[in-house]
Image (cartoon, rainbow, N blue to C red):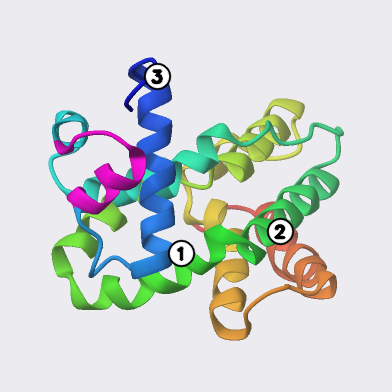
Amino acid sequence: MRGGSRRRGRELEKAILAATLEELAEVGYARLTMERVALRAHTGKAALYRRWPGRAELVVDACTAGEIDDEEPPDTGSLRTDVLTVMRQNADHLTGHRGDVLRGLIADLMNDPEFARLVRERVRTAGPGAIRLVLQRAVDRGELGPWLLDSRRVTVATDLLRNHYLLYGAPIPDDVITGIVDDVYLPLLLAPPAA
C-alpha cells in the first residue's frame, strides 16, 4: 500500500482472506494463484506464504473465516427456535457471495484429491460452529444429552441445507428449513443414542 500505513496482523490477514474469496468467486479455485490474491489484497506474496504454505490452506481458511466472525447465535432458551434461527442465517449466507464460492468449489474438490483431503480434515475439525454452540447450550439446559456433541447428528441439519442449496440453488424456501428442523433434525437430536 503506497502512501498509506502498512497493514499488519489481523488487519492484513482479513484483507488477504477477503481477496481470496473475491478471487474464488471471480476465477474459481483452479485458476486462483497466490500472486493474484496478493495483488488483490495489495500486499506481497511473502505475506501470504508466511501464513499459508499454499493456496489450498489459504482457500480453506478464507472459506471458514466468515464463520468465526459471524455474530453469536441466539440464545432464546428454546432449542427449536435457536436451531431455526441459525438455519435461516445459514440459508441467507448461501444466497450471497458465500454460496457462489461453495458451488464453485464442489467441482474443484472432485478434481483435486489433495484439496479435497484438506477440506475434509479442516471442515470436520471445525464443525458447524453456530449449530454446535446452540446444541451445547441445549445440553447445558438439560434438553439434550452430552453424548450428542460427539456424534454425527450434529451436522445433519447443515448438511441437508447445503445439499438442498447445491441441488436447487437459492433462495432456500422457509418451508424447506422448517421441514429439515421439524421433520428430521429435532427428532434425530431427541432420539436416544444407538446401542
Which residue is rendered at x = 55% and y = 75% of the image? 163
39 magenta-colored: yes
Instruction: Name the amino acid, label 2.
Output: Asp
Q: Which residues are magenta?
A: 34-45
116 magenta-colored: no
Mark 1: few, some, or many residues within 10 Å (few <14, many ≥20)?
many
Q: Nearer the viewer, mark 2 or mark 3?
A: 3
The spot of residue 111 in percent (x, y) is: 20, 77
The spot of residue 36 in percent (x, y) is: 25, 53
- Secondary element under disc 2, as helix, strand or loop, is helix
- Secondary element under disc 1, as helix, strand or loop, is helix
Instruction: Name the amino acid, label 1.
Output: Val
- Name the residue tied to disc 3: 4
Which residue is rendered at x = 85% and y = 33% of the image? 77
- Name the residue tied to disc 1: 101
Instruction: Name the amino acid, label 3.
Output: Gly
Q: In the rendered structure, are the residues bearing label 1 and label 3 in contact, judged by CB atoms less than 8 Å apart? A: no
Is residue 2 toward the left or the right of residue 53 in the image?
A: right
Sequence order check, earlier mark of 1 and 2:
2
